Image (cartoon, rainbow, N blue to C red):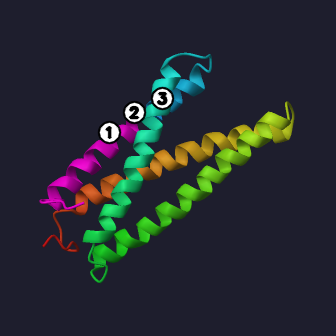
Amino acid sequence: MIIKKPQIFLKKISNVSIFLNIITSALGILYLIMPSPSILYDVFGVFMIFSWSLNLIMLSIIDKYLNKSSAIGKKINRHSYFFIVSFIICLLMMVFGIILTNFILSGFLAILGSLMIISGFFLIVIYGIYYSLLIFTTLSKEGWNFD
């Protein structure tokens, strides 16, 4: 995919990513407050998938235009790897939390499973907001190769 103005494109993607991550976190809090089934939770799932996908797309685009030899480039590159690792760990936490809550109906392990699901979800969303803000604020500084 050839992007004609990558700086403007990345700025728009990071804006949309910030917005989607904030909406996803708000819907996640609403889900914790009112856990009864609703059509709203289907919308929540769509927002969650879009925000996570957009974060991963932004990671792949950033890798192409980031100057990894500058100070800002090194910082963003480090955060990119940390985001990938934390994303994988949080997804595993959510999966194992779901497994625990499905097989154990009460007790400490059921509470632990629920906490794993909740913390995995919110860590992904919070770090997605932070990472998108980091990209948005550093796009106008040195450390990028927009040739």
What residue is drawn where x is 30% and y is 62%?
61
Q: Tell me, yes or no, if residue 129 can be seen here.
A: no
* Depth order, front residue of 90/61: 61
Q: Which quadrant of the figure has residue 71?
A: bottom left
* Depth order, front residue of 40/108: 40
Secondary element at tag 1:
helix
The x and y percentages for residue 56 are 41, 55
Within-10-Å neighbours for mark 3: few <14, some 14–19, many 20+:
some
In the image, which residues are magenta?
1-22
Q: Which residue in the protein does label 3 denote?
A: 44
Question: What's the magenta bit mostly, secondary-structure-wise?
Answer: helix
- Residues at circles 2 and 3 in contact by the CB criterion of under 8 Å: no
With respect to residue 26, does 94 lie above or below? below
Q: Which residue in the protein does label 2 denote?
A: 23
Q: Which quadrant of the figure has residue 134?
A: bottom left
Secondary element at tag 3:
helix
Task: Report, in whole angstroms, how far the alpha carbon at label 2 lies from the one at label 1.
Answer: 6 Å
What residue is drawn where x is 50% and y is 24%?
42
Within-10-Å neighbours for mark 1: few <14, some 14–19, many 20+:
some
* Depth order, front residue of 67/2: 2
Report the amino acid beneath label 2. Answer: Ile
Q: Which residue in the protein does label 1 denote?
A: 19
Query: Is residue 11 in the magenta section?
Result: yes
With respect to residue 99, does 64 lie above or below? below
- Residues at circles 2 and 1 in contact by the CB criterion of under 8 Å: yes
Secondary element at tag 2:
helix
What residue is drawn where x is 46% and y is 52%?
127
Q: How many marks?
A: 3
- Farthest front residue in view: 1
